[in-house]
Image (cartoon, rainbow, N blue to C red):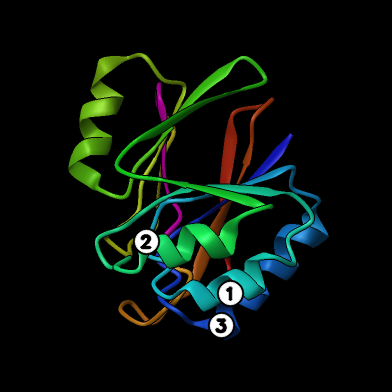
Amino acid sequence: MLIGVISDTHDNMHTLKKAVDLFNERGVGLVLHAGDYIAPFTAREFRRLQCKLVGVFGNNDGEKFGLVKQFEGFGKLYEGIHQLEIEGKMLAITHYPEIAETLASRGSYDVVIYGHTHRAEIRESHPLVINPGECGGWLEGKSTIAILDIVTMRAQLVDL
């Protein structure tokens, strides 16, 4: 199964549309979001996904109730850390790099995903650590996402 990994969309609907189109073209079975959607209206674009979305809140997601309401039916959003099992692999997702480092050091996960820094990183170790960078592109001037193949445990960064 391919999994789309995204973070820090920061209301950039133009790059978010590109990300959703790419996830749909690649046939991802799930999208994981590491936080900072920002406004509930971003759900309009995420709703076009041909799969479910699971994500965590980031430090800029102030209108959490509105986000949860708008994502109902196709997405679930969580506070702090969310863990899930996919095809026998344990994954953890958080917004914060410090928490990601702690989770990675525990050895309990196969994949740890985080955001917040706006800098893309794939660390091919055990666990596999992924920061998809910033979809929004506001801070670094580069919009990126990641695709994870849960079977091969390989991830790749994709420029939007």
Q: Of the residues under marks 2 and 3, which one precedes in the sequence?
A: 3
Viewer can see residue 19: no
Q: Given contact means CB atoms under 8 Å apart, are the residues at marks 1 and 2 in contact?
A: no
The residue indicated by pointer 1 is: 16
Residue type at tag 1 = Leu
Relative to the observer, which residue lies in front, 115 or 158? 115
The residue indicated by pointer 2 is: 64
Give left or right: position of 44 versus 28: left
Residue type at tag 2 = Lys
Rendered-image quadrant of the N terminus: top right
Q: Of the residues under marks 1 and 2, which one precedes in the sequence?
A: 1
The correct choice, above or below, for 100 with respect to 20 in the image is above
Mark 1 vs mark 2: give the one in front: 2
The residue indicated by pointer 3 is: 13
SS at mark 1 in the image:
helix
Which residues make up the magenta segment? 125-133
Give left or right: position of 52 versus 64: right
Q: Residue at x 25, y 48 (%)?
A: 96
Residue 75 percent location from the top left of the image = 60, 51
